[in-house]
Image (tube, helix red, strand yellow):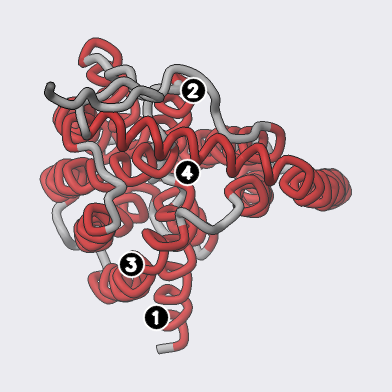
Amino acid sequence: MQKLLLLALVGLGAQLVDGSLGMAYGVTSTTLLLAVGTNPAAASATVHLAEIGTTLVSGFSHWKFGNVDWKVVAKIGVPGAVGAFAGATFLSNLSTETAAPLMAIILLVLGLYVFLRFTFQGLPKGHLGKPLRKRFLGPLGLVAGFVDATGGGGWGPVGTPAILASGRLEPRKTIGSIDTSEFLIAVAASLGFLWGLGDENIDYGWVAALLIGGVIAAPIAAWLVRHIPPRVLGAAVGGLIILTNTRSLLRSDWIDASDPVRYTVYAVIYAAWAAALVYAIKQYRKNADEDRRILAEAEAAAAADAAGEAPGEKASTPA
């Protein structure tokens, strides 16, 4: 019962992060399941089954708050589902000895990306209002879906930064659209795992615990996306993911590091993590006015686009 309660709290925390940053539910949840000794494929399957419910509620919540671009959802979600199914079947056929360190490496890379991305970069500037093309979103979805299934997470860490970097979609709609399209990825990956693994290795009590926590958090996260400082939260979550998966990798058969080596690496990570948090908080305070200006411009561009106007222009009135 204690473990189920812990999993529910993890699901709640992970969904708060994911719904606010557009990433890290799968990475955070899978990292915890691996840390308690779950089979890598079963861990990813458990998380994706829970995500069917959490992404459905999250997508609905983001839609209600006006955070979803349905054209983006369709263009990235369908190829993403294909990639997720392929990734799930691939992971299901790997041995535990091979899959565990491989997943730790993928999660470590994703955690490092989240950590660096949100510690050192502010909100994107660029070509707000210009359409995102299918030839960009299709391959992006395919790769992100495959990484998500094989790594137990990755849809957000791969998809969200790529769309943000384009500067064509305002941050809240990027996050809302990625979270909404993730429902398709969760369904496809779950089907792939059930086909490749069967259901004997999946603990449905764990699925339910993660699901309950995530469903509670989803509406709150959709509201928080306008208020929480992504830079600080991203640095905190990224550091946690790096630390946990470094620990798993150093203890794996691939490396099997000695205690002095492990503790030295942990100390370096803790020091870097603390420094990054201090830096992220300082930068957030320093750039708060600029970030608000960028968000205000994004809101204006979105409103103008919805009204059929060019940003900054007033609608012409008939004579």
Q: Choose between 162 and 290: the one closer to the eye.
A: 290
The residue at the far top in this view is: 135
The picture quadrant where one finds residue 162 is top left
The residue at the far bottom in this view is: 1
Number of numbered discs overlaid on the protein picture: 4
Q: For the residues marked 1 and 3, what is the alpha-carbon distance in whole angstroms?
A: 22 Å
Q: For the residues marked 4 and 2, what is the alpha-carbon distance in whole angstroms?
A: 31 Å
Question: What residue is pinned by disc 2?
Answer: 165
The picture quadrant where one finds residue 222 is bottom left
Q: Choose between 318 and 155: the one closer to the eye.
A: 318
**Tag 3: amino acid:** Pro
Q: Choose between 270 and 136: the one closer to the eye.
A: 136
Question: What residue is pinned by disc 1?
Answer: 4
Q: Position of residue 26 (x, y in %)?
A: 40, 51
Q: Nearer the viewer, mark 4 or mark 3?
A: 3
**Tag 1: amino acid:** Leu
